[in-house]
Amino acid sequence: MLSQNINSDLLSEVFSTLRLRSKLYFKTDFKGPYAIELPHEQRRIRFHLVLQGTCWLTPDGMEPQLLNEGDLVLVPDGVAQVISHNETYHYSRRIALAKAMEQGHFADGAFVYGSGEGRCRLLCGFCQFDEDIDHPVLINLPSLLVLNQKNLGSEPWMSGTLQLLKLEAELTGQGGNGILSRLLEIIFIQLVRRLSLDPEHTHKGFIAALSDIQLSKALNAIHQTPEKAWKVSSLAEVAGMSRARFADYFTRMVGLPPIEYLTLWRLMRARFLLSSTDYSIDSVAELCGYASTPSFSSRFKRQFNQGPGAYRRAVKA
């Protein structure tokens, strides 16, 4: 049953429903000169933590970014990118990751490549979400997010998590990958929350809407009681705004009209309940605001190209 707490943590609820999870690729041990191209990967937010040395990261269509020891960089949207030992080397000498892995080798759990000066050790992996859902919280992410320990003095919660991540990455033993994955998920959520305090990102977006006194009331109502027969007028009343002003403001801030967001959240909750509970499809339909199971099944299939029963069987197979 959904929470009825007006102070519920909607951001955590969204990420849980999106099934946020992170996985590790491997550690690297690169020695210059090198320039390795990582291919495009849809719906993945890649990350690289610099354990030792420095390197240059050049995501496709962006300027090269110098990464120093202790830096953590996240690249949303799975864009192709080049990791190189200097700023310009990648333009003429880059090779594909698959080719580099043929030429390199693994030693002590790390991918070793290259020879010479300029050693750089990285921890590489990605964060991933339910690939069939585009929630507004993911839409306004910057194309590149960089965290540096030296610049987090006023944010001890992020500094502490980043320091723990680096320390844990240097350890070996049982449970290490699980701990690293959880820490990366924590850091990603902290980064998204941090954007709400950045003047460049506070003017719009889901995080900004959560911080808005009036819109947050409507969003809480949608999240807590998606089964209710909400209309734009009733949501506007909850927000304490006129219908026209609420509809326009909600759409500009969140990126979706109120009823479209309500429908998205209902379908997200349905996927979550189908995959994580044994509720009957009839019960899921009712909990998610559908008057009948056939109408729910039809809407679910139209959105995800398979019915709720087929989806449940697929995710639990």
Image: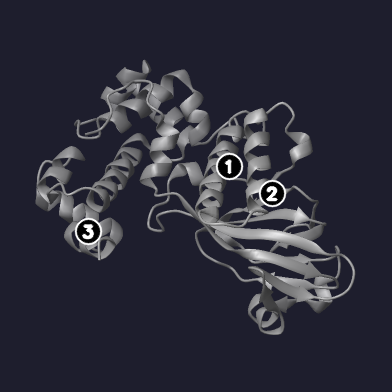
| For residue 189, side relative to residue 151 (left or right) | left
Depth check: give the residue in front, 150 or 255.
150
- The residue carrying mark 1 is 187
Q: Residue at x 10, y 47 (%)?
A: 282
Q: CA distance from mark 3 to mark 1?
A: 30 Å
Q: Of callouts 2 and 1, which one flags the residue occurring earlier in the amino acid sequence?
A: 2
Q: Residue at x 82, y 70 (%)?
A: 31
- 114 w.r.t. 269: above or below: below
Residue 45 in picture, x, y percent from top left: 56, 55
Circle 3 packing at 10 Å, graded few (<14), some (14-19), many (20+), is many
- 237 w.r.t. 17: above or below: above
Quarter of the figure that contains the C terminus: bottom left
- 252 w.r.t. 52: above or below: above
Badge 1 marks a residue whose secondary structure is helix
| For residue 261, side relative to residue 49 (left or right) | left
Q: CA distance from mark 2 to mark 3?
A: 36 Å
- The residue carrying mark 2 is 72
- 89 w.r.t. 66: above or below: below
- The residue carrying mark 3 is 312
Amino acid type at circle 1 is Ile
Count all numbered tags in the image, as a single digit: 3
- Could you tell me if the residues under marks 2 and 1 are in contact, i.e. CB atoms within 8 Å? yes
Amino acid type at circle 2 is Leu
